[in-house]
Image (cartoon, grey):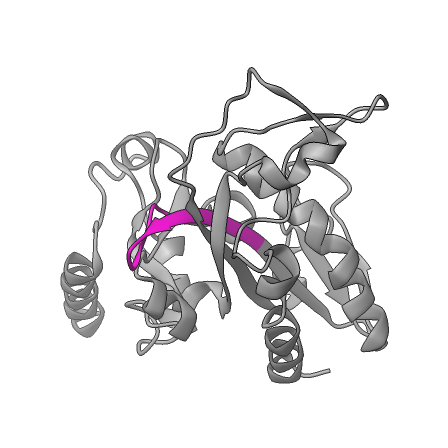
Amino acid sequence: MKKEDFYSLLSAEISHYKDYLETDSQEWIVKGFIDVDKNVYTISNDTKVVSKIIELLLIPKLDLFAKNNGLVLELPTKQNYYPDLTFKDSEGNLFAVDFKSSYYEGNVVNGLTLGSYWGYFRERDKKKNMDYTYDSYCCHLVLGMLYMQSVIASDERKLYSIDELSIIHSVIENFVFFLQPTWKIATDSPGSGNTRNIGGITNIVDLQQGNGPFAELGEDVFDDYWKGYFCVSDARNAGIGKPRYHNLETYKKYLKKQSKILNKL
């Protein structure tokens, strides 16, 4: 299967997921956790908790999607492995799909990080935190799951019975889904925190349409940029002094300098 065909099939599949995860009033179908005595415990809108539950809801549907299209869905053998989902066709072609979720306000997402620019991203022929090598995949896609946080706060101190589900307000609502190649929605800056993660664009329309700064430049430019990206501490540890560049503008200047050196040689 060609990567374009896989992308088209999966895009059509996720277009129905909003209806699957929402009630008629656009609230999340999940109200809380239930125990063996049928007590219901509400959940917070903590992004890690919410994200994991959404993933658990979608994996059976994605597995069915795979079976219906002659694919096999493989989950990572370890929790911190990339990607979240590996699809394999009958010819052995691999397609990487990574879940990314965040809440939004208006047209702006709180923030997305798109995986490491270190490790497996640079050493693409080695299995570093992966079951397959990075270059074994035909494409690397992001399945984005965006939502609004409810303005009605949940009371985690209160216990409900299963008969009271209708009065429990969901902690999130109004889902937006998108599917894009990682390079099309990446920025030229790292994600939040001190981790070596590639940052993602935050405008919802741009995420849906794949309008990141590398979209017109191409995947090869994206790869070269992030393979050569160093933060301050990594540049110092690598013995190159200071980072070669920190955004696309300084990246262009760096390439011009390298070009001049090459011309002299």
Place of residue 125 in the rendered image (x, y in percent of width and height, measured from the top left): 63, 56
Place of residue 254 in the rendered image (x, y in percent of width and height, measured from the top left): 18, 59
Quarter occupied by residue 216: bottom left
The majority secondary structure of the magenta stretch comes to strand
- Segment colored magenta: 99-111
The reply to whether residue 129 is visible in this rendering is no
Q: Is residue 124 left or right of residue 223?
A: right
The reply to whether residue 24 is visible in this rendering is yes
- The residue at 29%/30% (across/down) is 233
- The residue lying toward the viewer, choosing from 252 and 69, is 69
- Relative to 208, residue 147 above or below: above
Outermost residue, top side: 157
- The residue at 22%/49% (across/down) is 244
- The residue at 64%/43% (across/down) is 30
Quarter occupied by residue 66: bottom right
Q: Is residue 216 left or right of residue 133?
A: left
Place of residue 195 in the rendered image (x, y in percent of width and height, measured from the top left): 40, 34
Quarter placement of the C terminus = bottom left
Q: Is residue 244 magenta?
A: no
- The residue lying toward the viewer, choosing from 144 and 211, is 144
- The residue at 13%/62% (across/down) is 253
Quarter occupied by residue 62: bottom right
Q: Is residue 109 magenta?
A: yes
Quarter placement of the N terminus = bottom right
Q: Is residue 201 left or right of residue 248?
A: right
